[in-house]
Image: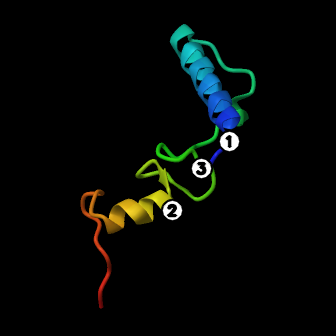
Amino acid sequence: MAKTSLIVKQARLENKRLTALANGTKMKNICKHYNRCKLCGRTRSFIRDFGVCRVCFRVHARQGQILGMRKAAW
């Protein structure tokens, strides 16, 4: 589980980025932005297509909550 302080920091950076985009300016430290899982906040092993980490992806795919995903059988 991600630290709450890191999630808050990331949300603050995201708001700054959106404000800069709305104003038509560039953010100073654009490289600080990184992807986080929408469910648990994990930064590593992020699957960009689904917006979640591999752990959450596996759990939800196994439960059938991700459309089009099913367990491979051969």
**In the image, which is nearer the foreground, mark 1 or mark 3?**
1
Locate residue 53, reporting x and y percent.
52, 55
Pointer 1 or 2: first along the chain: 1
The 10 Å Cα crowd at callout 3, few under 14, some 14 to 19, many 20 or more, is many
Q: What numbered label is drawn on residue 42? A: 3
Q: Position of residue 26 (x, y in %)?
A: 65, 18
Indicate the secondary structure of the residue bearing disc 1: loop
Residue 3's disc is 1
**Amino acid at the residue labelled 3:** Arg
In the image, taking residue 53 as reference, residue 20 lies left or right, namely: right
**Relative to residue 31, is residue 61 drawn left or right?**
left
**Mark linked to residue 55:** 2
- Tell me whether the residue at label 1 lies in contact with that at label 3, contact meaning CB atoms closer than 8 angstroms: no
Q: Name the residue at 58% across, 43% down.
A: 35
Type of the residue with mark 2: Val
Whether 13 is drawn above or below 34: the answer is above
Residue 49 percent across, percent down from the top left: 42, 52
| Residue at mark 1 to residue at mark 3: CA–CA distance | 9 Å
Q: Position of residue 46 (x, y in %)?
A: 55, 54
In this figure, which colouring scheme has been used for the structure?
rainbow
Residue projecting furthest to the top: 23
Question: Gap in Å between the C-alphas at discs 2 and 3?
Answer: 9 Å
Q: Which mark, residue 60?
A: none
Q: Earlier in the sequence, mark 2 or mark 3?
A: 3
Task: Confirm or deny contact between disc 2 and disc 3 (CB under 8 A).
Answer: yes
Residue located at (30% from left, 64% from top): 63
Give the distance between the C-alpha atoms of the residues marked 1 and 2, in whole angstroms: 17 Å
- Element under disc 2: helix
**Mark 1: amino acid:** Lys
- Identify the residue at horizontal 28%, vertical 71% (top origin): 70
